[in-house]
Image (tube, grey):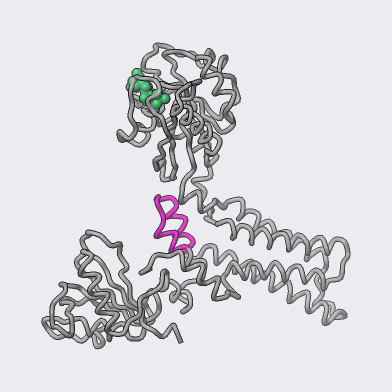
Amino acid sequence: MKEEETIAAISTPLGRSGIGIVRLSGPEALGIAGKLFTSPDGIDLTEVESHTLHYGYVQDPREKKEIDEVLVSVMKAPRTYTREDVAEINCHGGVVPLRETLELALDAGARPAEPGEFTKRAFLNGRLTLDQAKSVKDIVDSKTRFSLELSLDRLEGKFSDFLSSLREELTAIMAEIETTIDFPDYEESIVTREELEEKLSELEGRIQDYLANSKDGKILKEGHKIAVLGRPNVGKSTLLNTLLREERAIVSSTPGTTRDTLEEELEIDGIPFRVTDTAGIRQTEGEIEKQGVRRAKEQGRKSDISLLLVDVNSGVKPEDLNIAEEVDKGKTILVLNKIDLVDNLSNREITAKMGSGWADLVKLSAKEGQGLKNLESSITELVWGGEVRKDESLVLLNVQEKELLKRAKKSLADAREALRSGRSIDLVELDIREGRKDLGKLLGEDLTDEVLDRVFSDFCVGK
Ligand SMILES: Nc1nc2c(ncn2[C@@H]2O[C@H](COP(=O)(O)OP(=O)(O)OP(=O)(O)O)[C@@H](O)[C@H]2O)c(=O)[nH]1
Ligand SMILES: [Mg+2]
C-alpha cells in the first residue's frame, strides 16, 4: 500500500535562514535517518526513546563525507503529527545542506513527499478530521493574527464538533421515525408530527446562526479591497504612505503625480486589506493620464470600500462633485483631508456641496497623521459592522462549505414542509437523510481519492 512508504521533504522554506528541517515519516523513517546520521557517541536512532533530540552529523554513507552538523528529533508512532514514526533533521538553513540531506534520505529508501502528504497521512490515520487538516493550510497561509485565530479554532475541531452533534441529532430523529413506521401501534414509540417539526426547526436555527457568524475565509486571507480616490493633489498618495507607515508612493505638489494604480497590503487591527492608490481623477487630454483615470474609476467599482478625498484647504471643486456623482456612496468614506491647513472646518459646508449618504465622514491630515485612528476604525467598522470582530463564535468557512451547510438547512426546511402538509413520513425521512448526507460531506466522509487529492494539492511540500 502507498501509505506504507516512507516519505521525505524539506519542511522549511528554502533560502538563507538559521535552520532548515528535512522531515521523514513512515515505517522506515528512523532507519533511513539512522543511515545518514553519525554521532560522536554512536547513537542508533532506531533504539532511542521517543520524543528525544540527538546531536551529530549528516554524512554521505558512501563517501563518509560530512554534509552538515545537525540535531535530529525522533518521534515514534503513534504520538506524532502523522501517527507514523517521524524523524526531523534540523540542518543549518542553507539550500545546499538541506538539498543534499534530502537526496541522501531518498537514496536511502525514502520517497519524495507530495504537497500536503504529511497532513494527508495525519488525516488518513485518524489524527485530524478533514476539516482540521484543511485548517492546517489556513494556518500556514494566515497573513494576520486574526485569521490565524479563526483557523486555530477550526484546528481544535470546533466546526467538526458542531457538525457531528448536528448529525447525531438527525440520526436520532431518523431512528424515531423508523420506530414509528415499524411499530405504528406501540404508543411509546410514536413521535408526533408537531414534535418533529419543532425539533427540525430548532436544528435549522442552529445552522442559520452558524451561517450568520461565518466569514468568507478568502476575504480574511486576501483582504478587503480599499480604493483611494479623488481629484489630483488632494493627498491620496500621502494617505497611502501614512496608512502603510512607509514612503511607498511618490508624493509631490504637482497635480497628476500618480499615473497608475499602486496596490499594497495593509493590516488594520489584525484584519488584512489591500489598498490601492490611484491617479487623480480629472478631465485630461494626456493619453497616459487618461488611462490612469480610467483605471482609477475601475478600482473604485471593484473595491469593497472607497476613500474619497477632498482637499479642505482648496475647497470643494467641480471635479470633486463629478467624482462624487460616480461613486457608490454606501461603501465610500468621505475623507476631508489637509485639516492641518484650515482653522475651523464646518462639516456642513462640505456636505452641503458633496451631498449626504456617505458611509462615513472623517477629518484627516494625511500628512500629519491627525484623524488617522478615526479613519482606521471607520474602515474596520464598515467591514465588520463593528461588533462582529469581538464575537467568539465567528467561524471561517469557504464558499463550498457554506453551500453545503445551506443545502443541509434547506433539506430540513423541506422535511418540515412535508410534515406540515401531511405527506407520508417516509418522504419526510428522505429529506432528513439528504441533509444528513451533506453534513457527512462536510465532515469528510465518502471522500473519493480525487477530492482528497484536490484538498491536499494546494498545500506546500513538507506540510
Ligand atoms: N498640509 C498638508 N499637505 C498635504 C496633506 N496631504 C497631502 N499634502 C500635500 O499635498 C500635495 C499632494 O499630495 P499627494 O499625496 O501627492 O496627492 P495625490 O492625491 O496623490 O496627487 P496625484 O497623484 O497628483 O493625484 C503634496 O505636496 C503633499 O505633501 C495634508 O494632510 N496636509
Ligand atoms: Mg498620487
Examine the image and state in which quarter residue 65 appears: bottom left
Q: Relative to residue 172, is residue 274 drawn left or right? A: left
Examine the image and state in which quarter residue 406 appears: bottom right
**Is 145 covered by the magenta stretch?**
yes
Which residue is at 59% across, 23% downward?
Answer: 325
312 shown above or below 393 = above
Can I make out residue 335 in this image?
no
Which residue is at 55% across, 66% downward?
Answer: 161
What quarter of the picture does the C terminus occupy? bottom left
Farthest residue in the left direction?
40
Which residue is nearer to you in this view: 388 or 317?
Answer: 317
108 shown above or below 14 = below
- Give the percent coordinates (x, y) of residue 296: 49, 32
- Give the percent coordinates (x, y) of residue 114: 41, 73
Which residue is at 24% across, 88% downward?
Answer: 47
Q: Which residues are magenta?
A: 135-155
Ligand number 2: quarter of image? top left
Which residue is nearer to you in this view: 393 or 463?
Answer: 463
Which residue is at 52% across, 63% downward?
Answer: 158
- Give the percent coordinates (x, y) of residue 96: 21, 67
Q: Main secondary structure of the magenta part?
A: helix
Q: Relative to residue 43, is residue 86 drawn left or right? A: right
107 shown above or below 19 = below
- Give the percent coordinates (x, y) of residue 394: 53, 52
Examine the image and state in which quarter residue 30 appears: bottom left
Can I make out residue 273 in this image?
yes
Which residue is nearer to you in this view: 398 or 237?
Answer: 237
